[in-house]
Amino acid sequence: MTPADMALAKERYEQAAKHYQVAAVRMRRARLMYVAGAVCWTLGVLVPLLVLIT
């Protein structure tokens, strides 16, 4: 491998690492949104049911 190949590989690796970091943050945010949505939906369904039952 020539020094140019090494530099290119390093650059590609850094780009991939940055992309992965962004993807990880997006996944975390998406999971938070999903959990919040699930909690809200559960409350929206369970509270009226409990009110109807009691």
Image (tube, grey):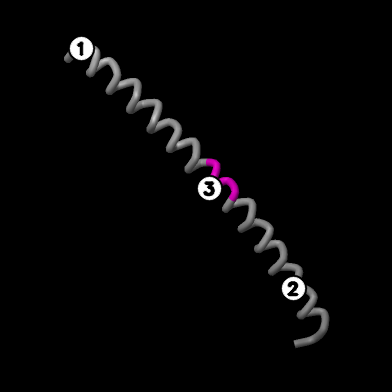
CA separation in Å, label 1 and label 2: 63 Å
The dot on residue 35 is: none
CA separation in Å, label 3 and label 2: 25 Å
Q: Callout 1: helix, strand or loop?
A: helix
* Count of numbered circles on the image: 3
Camera-side mark, 3 or 2? 3
Q: Are marks 1 and 3 in contact (CB under 8 Å)?
A: no
The dot on residue 27 is: 3
**Residue 24 in the image: above or below residue 39:** below
Q: Callout 3: helix, strand or loop?
A: helix
Residue that label 2 marks: 10
What amino acid is labelled 1 in the image? Leu
Q: Are marks 3 and 2 in contact (CB under 8 Å)?
A: no
What amino acid is labelled 3 in the image? Met
> What is the crowding at mark 3: few (fewer than 14 residues within 10 Å), some, or many (at least 20)?
few
Q: In the image, is 30 to the left or to the right of 7?
A: left
Q: Which residues are magenta?
A: 25-29
Residue that label 1 marks: 52
Label whose residue precedes the other's in the sequence (1 or 2): 2
CA separation in Å, label 1 and label 3: 37 Å
Q: In the image, is 26 to the left or to the right of 3?
A: left
**Residue 4 in the image: above or below residue 23:** below
Q: In the image, is 40 to the left or to the right of 25?
A: left
Rendering quarter of residue 7:
bottom right
Q: Which residue corresponds to the image point at 55% horizontal and 42% vertical from the top-left?
A: 29
